Image: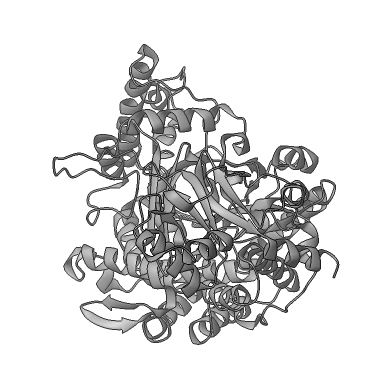
Amino acid sequence: MGEQKVKTGLHDKGRAEFIKHLLSDIDALELMLEKGLIEDDIVRIGSEQEFCLVTRHWRPSNKAEEILSAINDPHFTTELALFNLEINLDPIELKGDCFEKVESQLKNLLQKAAEAAKEYDAKVLLTGILPTISKKELEFHYMTPHQRYWALNDMLKELRGDDFTLHIKGVDDLTLIHDSVLFEACNTSFQMHLQVPPHDFISSFNWAQAISGPILGISTNSPLLLGRELWHETRVALFQQSIDTRHSSYALKNQQARVSFGTDWEKGSIAEIFKNDVAQHEVILSREIETNSLEMIKNGHIPKLHALNIHNGTIYKWNRPCYGVGGGKPHIRIENRHIPSGPTTLDEMATFAFWVGLMMGRPKKFDDMPSVMDFREAKANFIKAARTGKYSVLSWMGRPISVKDLILIELLPIAYQGLEKMGIDKGSIQKYLRIIENRARGITGSQWIITNYRKLNQIMKKDDALRMLTKALYQNQESGKPVNDWPSVPIENDLAKSSHLVGHIMSTQLFTVQENDLANLAVRIMQWKNIHHVPVKNQDNEISGILTWTHMKRHEAEPAENSLKTVEEIMEKNVTTVVPETPISEAIGIMKQNEFGCLPVVREKELVGIITIKDVIQFDHGATV
């Protein structure tokens, strides 16, 4: 998440001083480009691994800070939520067995994290979106208590002027209003970096944009959010909406999202990209900066361009230009941000090698992308791939082609040539690119998750299905096999033992009626759907009553002249409710004491579920298995 010592404030004097440094940084970058000070005689790769922390019951852990302290390694850093951490791997020259070295370091660091997590009864999991995240873990107290995250949350809300709104439509729909930026914390990625010489940066960046669609299509791993089956890479839609600062208005305006694929091919130099970003996106974070970057260059020193990097860190392009300094030498690189975490380190490294091979093997005809491909074609490919993954039919140089065929026929040969050109060991090339080939012919992470979740969802409650799926993700990752070789999820009966809250076992697929509905309508619904309890809502969408099978039978026995009675006239108005966080044992006690057949579950007066005698019986049976 970048620099931690930042400040907020859209109007204070310190912000003006920060913007002054930001402009100076851009001038300094242009001067370094002009004088040839940017490193151009070596190519390095680097990566960042975000990962989830889960409890022994496969739910999000909140022990990130304690685990980070126990790890005690500068490669690790916090993330936005207390159930995530990040690893920053060492950059390494692109040659020989570099990918094996990166893979080895990544495995060693993940093992170090796993050993520390064990002390806090937690496990490490690689997945694009943790299936068991619920709305409970997206409340403010799950945000990592660091200044940068608080500042980011406050500033994005101030810019929006309202809470955050999510609406994602896939196989299921998710529509939700949320009061913090924490939905962004659901996203867990494997970010890949490639150093690029200044003279080739624009051609490389545009090529990275062009190949984003097929690379994403072969790498999707995030189809579920809050138990909803959405996009094959739901992170793409979620990330944009979770930190969207744009206002809705009656005027038709072209507003650029802070998370975006872009609007056109880039031109000029990397400095031009940064200029456009400053022009299009308001400065939302700042910090005190003591040294002037232009003065540093004049005195023979290399500046770190702090202001530029802070601002760049608040603009979340799926391919992001980056400036850095390593060993006293400045460099520029492309950060690929659209690849999800997991399913295994081997899958991630295969994708890494594939992307780098494509970048380094770029055919000469693609040096000038605007002359061979419409930008909107590349952007459409990216959105299609995010929505439907490997099932997508993309447009490549004006002709339709499936992700599978585009990978196998067009792109894999380029990747092989690119890695050979850079002197990568033949064994490494075969090892990693063969995984991509098998994945293209077989399944991706999102396909495996969707297939198994649908199977589990048919035979058990959603919460149990999500936890069983998460457990299987962990076990398969531990096997080290790439996702194409994973078996189906075995059915187990021990998960009910760790269900202890009403929200874990309640039914969420509800049939409800309104107070002013005809009572006969409610009776018919209960008969048609064979249900014994129907919650009643008022005009404010709050629960105001309950209809039971007893009410229905009583109403049916009434004379025909009462057929125009409304639901309000026959319902039970004194309704006892619980919340999702109510212990199941407490809910059972309430039901037994009052001889209730059901308990509506509410959050802030709004109905979110119902727990019935049937749910309790199933829970009691599962807990004794």
* Left or right side of 612 for 412: left
Residue in the image at 53% along x and 37% along y: 328
Residue placed furthest toward the top: 13
- Total number of numbered labels? 0
Indicate the quadrant where residue 497 lies.
bottom right
* Left or right side of 197 for 282: left
Q: Is residue 616 visible?
A: yes
Q: Position of residue 289 (x, y in %)?
A: 46, 20
Residue in the image at 42% along x and 70% along y: 171
Q: Is residue 40 visible?
A: no
Q: Position of residue 212 (x, y in %)?
A: 38, 65
Q: Is residue 563 above or below residue 118?
A: below
Indicate the quadrant where residue 406 lies.
bottom left
* Left or right side of 30 for 128: right
Colouring of the image = one colour
Q: Position of residue 412 (x, y in %)?
A: 44, 80
Residue in the image at 40% along x and 36% along y: 163
In the depicted view, which residue is nearer to us: 52 or 551? 551
Residue placed furthest toward the left: 251
The quarter in which the C terminus is drawn is: bottom right
Residue in the image at 54% along x and 59% along y: 551
Q: Is residue 59 above or below residue 38?
A: below
